[in-house]
């Protein structure tokens, strides 16, 4: 590793204008930090405020090394001075604190004290502390792949380094050798939990010393000059060597954790006195005067200018508009790609039939050829001749190379979180990930999944992850626990993500193409039992596209509507055919294809035509997605019903491994047939 010299600052040799700028930023931050609680007392907002006083040196330094043109900054909720140092104005800080519509971080949609400016690459991070480390790693991956000169900077408290996704982030960053700086602001407390209850090491950074390709810097984060020099060295080192860096900054928390915490309950008077005496602002001021770089009057003059600036910013922010109640549905999801040739997502059914797995593989390859900024990764997706546990990605790495098609660690949080991060680098980027080898294993990524669903809404439309999460779902393969469960009912409850579930090869291809070409995240659920099953085969036009929110009538009928998706679409078709042959009844099969958004119009129109409804899916009846469909029909089409809405699904049990147990648990044609026959006779 090379480690060339970096310019060093000192009190004596740094030009006065630079020192003045630093002091002024510190003064501005401290005035705002002290003023924030008053807004809550006056019922004006800022109901969450985490004071940063005591972190001044390192936060000033982070903002000063950040370059908004090339770098990406992920601050945490205590990083007020960091964002001020990076360029946010007093007015922008206050607008965020009191949740105004013109707040640049998110228009009042996110918790106060979460400062951001997405257009400057100062990212809007969530309250799940430390989770943005994965986003920083993801964007650092893009910085490296696109040969940019910037770095990603992730900032957090030392206690949040106990989170598993922080270890996943650092493991991945060191393995891929990425230019990312992890700043640990160590104030010795996680709210009221002392560091000794978090880790055995005195310094949290030492927990990562065993990682290869990692440089660790330690610095007194209370010391301005040391912090500036260390952050400059860290950035230079990360850029020059293209490996991650940890900067462990020792700081103090002079106040309580936040305005809902009282540190007097766990810190004695002597400790509180000691942290106040270590005030970085006071120490920097004393050094400036002692070195005869400034007089007390000069510094007082700067303080007075800052107070006037904050007063002016306060008056402007108070007059700024509040968010309006009718704006809550704005920026829920970006507008999707719209098909001109296939607006209804249907075609003439001509041509040779293809397997569902073939349709997926060919569509992925076609879209990778169409957009060179498309990537895919996941567990087991690309090694020699293998292309995923089901071979959906077979041949992709051979054609598109390891830069675009590569394996990820067995770490679902890492897979999803870095996809979120990498998509921030360039709006042209499209990322397809195998969120887990089986949908049942996706749960470790839930925190990152939830994060992804509200990114577009939380940022007020400034950022949406262009990510397609592929999950192989469902049973009928004898897989048992963690290989045969259905998860769509849980995953579709989160607003802000599209959820699609094809049951034929053509719909799989068409929905995948639309998902990749659209902006924003899509959950693409694949019924793995149909990958190679002839039932799922169909002709697939090379350019086929299926819009979101468009159901498909797979069988016309007039006596009953079977509303379904996924594996059970074929079972419904079999049951409908059998009943038709036996009784002459005409059953309509509606394959919804898209769960979110849901095609209410097609469903309601079918109900109006048939007056009887059987909702069928593979997942459990209790709390299954069919409950939403049944409720919607009852609310919006009750007067057209001649019988109660009936549901068929799996039992309220896990899916067992034994074929005998699986058959007893899962939905099948016989169960659908029996329920439909009873409903016809109602």
Image (spheres, grey):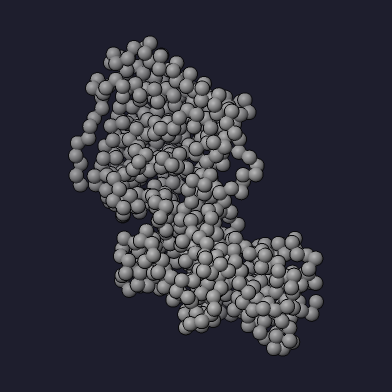
Residue nearer the viewer, 232 or 649: 232
Left or right: 440 in relation to 204: right
Res 655 quadrant in image: bottom right
Residue 323, image x and y in percent? 60, 38
Left or right: 336, with 120 as reference point: right
Residue 199 visible, this orientation? no
Residue drawn at 65 percent across, 42 percent down: 325
Q: 565 or 118: nearer the eye?
A: 118
Farthest residue to the front: give it: 340
Which is nearer the eye, 351 or 275?
351
Please provide percent x and percent y for residue 105: 50, 39
As drawn, 545 above or below 536: above
Q: Position of residue 276 (x, y in %)?
A: 44, 22
Q: Is residue 606 visible?
A: yes
Residue 603: where, in percent of width, then height?
68, 68
Residue drawn at point x = 54 percent, y = 78 percent: 348
Where is the C terminus found, in terms of image quarters?
Answer: bottom right
Q: Nearer the viewer, residue 655 or 580?
A: 580
Report the residue at 55% width, 53% height from top: 333
């Amino acid at each position: 590793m090379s480690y060339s010299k970096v310019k060093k600052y000192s009190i004596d040799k740094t030009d006065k204008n630079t020192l003045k700028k630093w002091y002024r930023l510190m003064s501005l931050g401290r005035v705002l930090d002290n003023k924030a609680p008053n807004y809550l007392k006056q019922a004006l907002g800022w109901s969450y405020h985490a004071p940063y006083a005591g972190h001044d040196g390192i936060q000033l330094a982070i903002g000063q090394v950040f370059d908004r043109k090339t770098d990406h900054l992920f601050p945490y909720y205590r990083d007020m001075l960091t964002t001020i140092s990076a360029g946010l104005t007093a007015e922008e800080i206050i607008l965020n604190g009191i949740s105004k519509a013109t707040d640049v971080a998110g228009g009042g949609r996110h918790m106060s004290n979460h400062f951001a400016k997405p257009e400057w690459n100062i990212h809007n991070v969530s309250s799940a502390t430390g989770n943005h480390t994965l986003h920083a790693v993801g964007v650092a991956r893009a910085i490296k792949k696109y040969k940019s000169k910037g770095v990603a900077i992730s900032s957090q408290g030392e206690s949040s380094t106990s989170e598993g996704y922080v270890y996943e982030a650092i493991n991945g960053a060191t393995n891929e050798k990425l230019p990312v700086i992890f700043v640990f602001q160590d104030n010795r407390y996680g709210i009221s939990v002392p560091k000794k209850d978090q880790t055995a090491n005195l310094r949290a950074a030492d927990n990562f010393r065993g990682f290869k390709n990692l440089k660790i810097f330690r610095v007194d984060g209370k010391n301005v000059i040391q912090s500036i020099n260390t952050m400059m060295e860290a950035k230079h080192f990360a850029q020059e060597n293209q490996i991650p860096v940890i900067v462990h900054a020792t700081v103090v928390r002079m106040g309580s954790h936040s305005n809902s915490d009282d540190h007097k309950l766990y810190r004695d008077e002597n400790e509180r006195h000691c942290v106040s005496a270590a005030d970085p602002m006071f120490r920097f001021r004393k050094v400036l005067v002692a070195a005869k770089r400034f007089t007390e009057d000069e510094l007082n003059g700067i303080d007075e200018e800052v107070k006037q600036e904050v007063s002016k910013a306060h008056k402007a922010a108070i007059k700024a508009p509040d968010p309006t109640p009718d704006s809550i549905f704005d920026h829920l999801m970006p507008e999707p790609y719209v098909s001109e040739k296939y607006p209804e997502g249907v075609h003439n059914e001509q041509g040779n039939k293809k397997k569902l797995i073939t349709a997926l593989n060919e569509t992925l390859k076609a879209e990778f050829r169409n957009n060179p900024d498309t990537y895919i990764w996941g567990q087991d997706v690309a090694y020699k001749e293998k292309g995923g546990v089901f071979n959906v990605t077979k041949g992709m790495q051979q054609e598109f190379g390891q830069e675009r098609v590569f394996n990820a660690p067995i770490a679902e949080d890492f897979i999803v979180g870095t996809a979120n991060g990498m998509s921030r680098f360039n709006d042209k980027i499209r990322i397809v990930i195998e969120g887990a080898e089986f949908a049942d294993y996706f749960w470790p990524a839930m925190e990152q999944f939830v994060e992804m669903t509200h990114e577009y809404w939380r940022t007020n439309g400034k950022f949406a992850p262009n990510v397609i999460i592929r999950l192989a779902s469902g049973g009928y393969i004898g897989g048992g626990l963690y290989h045969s469960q259905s998860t769509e009912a849980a995953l579709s409850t989160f607003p802000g993500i599209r959820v699609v579930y094809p049951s034929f090869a053509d719909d799989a291809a068409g929905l995948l193409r639309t998902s990749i070409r659209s902006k924003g995240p899509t959950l693409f659920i694949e019924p793995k039992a149909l990958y190679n099953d002839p039932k799922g085969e169909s002709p697939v036009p090379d350019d086929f596209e299926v819009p979101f929110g468009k159901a498909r009538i797979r069988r016309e009928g007039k006596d009953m509507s079977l509303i379904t998706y996924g594996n059970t679409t074929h079972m419904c078709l079999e049951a409908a055919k059998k009943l038709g042959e036996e009784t002459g009844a005409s059953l309509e099969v509606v394959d919804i294809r898209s769960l979110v958004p849901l095609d209410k119009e097609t469903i309601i129109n079918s109900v109006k035509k048939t007056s009887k409804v059987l909702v069928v899916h593979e997942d459990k009846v209790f709390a299954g997605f069919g409950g939403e469909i049944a409720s919607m029909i009852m609310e919006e089409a009750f007067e057209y019903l001649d019988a109660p809405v009936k549901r068929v699904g799996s039992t309220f049990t896990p899916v067992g491994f034994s074929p005998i147990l699986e058959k007893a648990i899962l939905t099948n044609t016989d169960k659908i047939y029996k329920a439909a026959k009873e409903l016809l006779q109602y």
